[in-house]
Amino acid sequence: MTLWIAILLTGIGCYLLKYAGLSAPRRLLDHPLVNRFAMTVPVALLAALIALQAIADGRDLVLDVPKLAGLATAVVALLLRAPFLVVILAAAATAAGLRLLGVG
């Protein structure tokens, strides 16, 4: 029963958060600090998710060399300003190649 209470409270909280965002005054949303925050938070969350996927397996931290090499390849490709598709393909090819060679 407590699971359903938690689900119900989470749903209500999400609805109230959405409502608060929709009812915020326009001058607040146009503030430069709020605008900068809204632009950087998704990037930070995505980076955290990528890092977690690279070093975690369930509840365990793992050293998965092909994943980390693919992540490093993606970082280098991004620094070289490669197109996004090239970044993804280079990272995937690196990880797949290392797995094919039996590394990790």
Image (cartoon, rainbow, N blue to C red):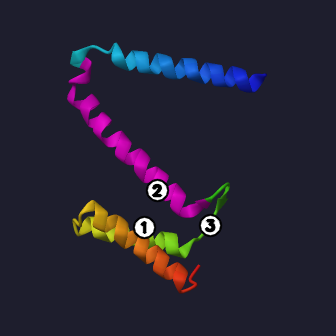
**Which numbered disc covers residue 62?**
3
Can you say whether 48 is above or below 72 in the image? above
Q: Is residue 18 left or right of residue 6?
A: left
Q: Nearer the viewer, residue 63 or 9?
A: 9
Q: Position of residue 81 (x, y in %)?
A: 22, 65
Name the residue carrying label 1. Answer: 71
| Residue at 41% across, 53% down | 47
Binning the other alpha carbons within 10 Å of mark 1 as few (below 14), some (14 to 19) or many (20 upward) gives many
Q: Please state the extent of the stretch shown in magenta in the rendering.
A: 28-56
SS at mark 1 in the image: helix
Q: Position of residue 2 (x, y in %)?
A: 76, 23
Binning the other alpha carbons within 10 Å of mark 3 as few (below 14), some (14 to 19) or many (20 upward) gives few
Q: Amino acid at mark 1?
A: Leu
Alpha carbon of mark 1 to alpha carbon of mark 3: how far?
A: 14 Å
Q: Is residue 18 left or right of residue 37?
A: right
Which badge, 1 or 3, is on the more N-terminal residue? 3
Tag 1–tag 3 contact (CB < 8 Å): no
| Residue at 35% across, 17% down | 22
Which badge, 2 or 1, is on the more N-terminal residue? 2
Q: Position of residue 16 (x, y in %)?
A: 48, 16
Name the residue carrying label 2. Answer: 50
Tag 2–tag 1 contact (CB < 8 Å): yes
SS at mark 3 in the image: loop
Alpha carbon of mark 2 to alpha carbon of mark 1: how far?
A: 8 Å
Q: Amino acid at mark 3?
A: Val
